[in-house]
Every structure is written in structure tokens, then in C-alpha cells.
Image: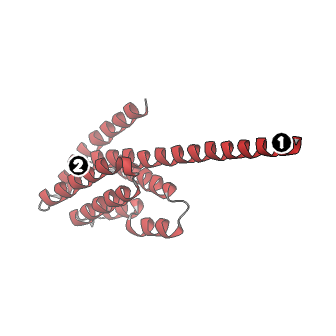
Amino acid sequence: VAAAAQRAMLDVVKEQLAAGDTSGLFSLLGELQQAMLATVAHSVRQRDEINDRFDAKWLEQQAAAGALTLAEVHNLMLYVARTIEGWQAPADAPAAAAWVAEVTGLVEATAGDDLGPFIASHLPDFVGRAVDNVGAVYKRIVELQEELGRQRAAEEEGGASSSSSAAAE
């Protein structure tokens, strides 16, 4: 259900962009930024770095003022992709590396493009993939926490039965 909802949302954003409305795109970028910040909530340094390098509101202001450049969008895409790749679990690393290579190839192939058509053609799908990849990181974190919880419970149970056995002697 979530994947279908995300696809529908990306379709709406693409339609908005085709009509010259960027509000949905910048809202999606803001959600991606917040998801990335939540993923590294434990690290002030990483949160500060994300806030320094990825500010959706600033990007929206730059776009509204006609000051946003393709180079800035390309740099953001590369930063986001490489950052998310660095967070991936080893099991997900090959897929993440392939995505970064895809993004890098796109950036290189579109260096001379006009900003508006580039954004409309490529940024919604990029944001969708980035959200999916942050979701994969989050899923692995939750799985790891659950596994650690099971291990702790087993250790405590083992310790409790050892204690009761010793007390019975």
C-alpha cells in the first residue's frame, strides 16, 4: 500500500511540475530531508552536516528567486545518494552502489541541460528512490534493534534460570 501511495504521490508531483508548480516537489524534498535527519538522530555531527548540505526550504527559495542552478541540484543529488549509500547495511550495499552509479551517470550525462526540464524529468524519481533507500536503512535498524532485544531477553532468561538453579541448590 505504501509503495502504491508513493507512486501516486510522485505522479501528482510530476503533473504539478509539468504545469509549472514546484510546491509538491519541494514538499517531497523536505520529507526526504526529515527522514534523513531522523535516521541519524543519534549523531549531532551527521545532523549538522545534513542541515548544512541539504536544506529543502532554501532550495525552494532559490528556485522561487530564479537563482537555483543545475549544478546545485546535481551536487545535492550526489550528496544525498552518497550519504544514503554510506548508511546501507552490507546486504544492501550492492544495490545502493548501483543506485549511486546511476545517479552519477545521470549527473554527468545532463551537465548541459536546462534546469526546469531536468527537474521535471529526473528529480521526482530520484527523490522516490532516495526515500526508498532511507526506508531500507530504517528497516535494517529496526531489525537490528529487534534482534538485539531478543538476544538480551535470551541472556536475561538464561541468567534467571541459572540464578534459580543456584538458589535451589
Which residue corresponds to the image point at 43% horizontal and 45% vertical from the top-left?
135
Residue 111 at what x, y percent from top left? 14, 62
Which residue position holds label 2? 122
Q: CA distance from mark 1 to mark 2?
A: 63 Å
Labels 1 and 2: the sequence-earlier one: 2
| Labels in figure, total | 2
The quarter of the image holding the C terminus is top right
Residue 156 at what x, y percent from top left? 72, 46
Q: Nearer the viewer, residue 166 or 53?
A: 166
Task: Give amino acid for label 1.
Answer: Ser
Q: Is residue 146 visible?
A: yes
Callout 1 crowding tier (Cα within 10 Å): few <14, some 14–19, many ≥20: few
Contact check, label 1 and label 2, Cβ < 8 Å: no
Q: Is residue 21 visible?
A: no
Residue 6 at what x, y percent from top left? 38, 37
Task: Give amino acid for label 2.
Answer: His
- 168 to the left or right of 41: right
Callout 2 crowding tier (Cα within 10 Å): few <14, some 14–19, many ≥20: few
- 27 to the left or right of 154: left
What element does badge 1 sit on?
A: helix
Numbered circle sitting on residue 164: 1
- 89 to the left or right of 126: right
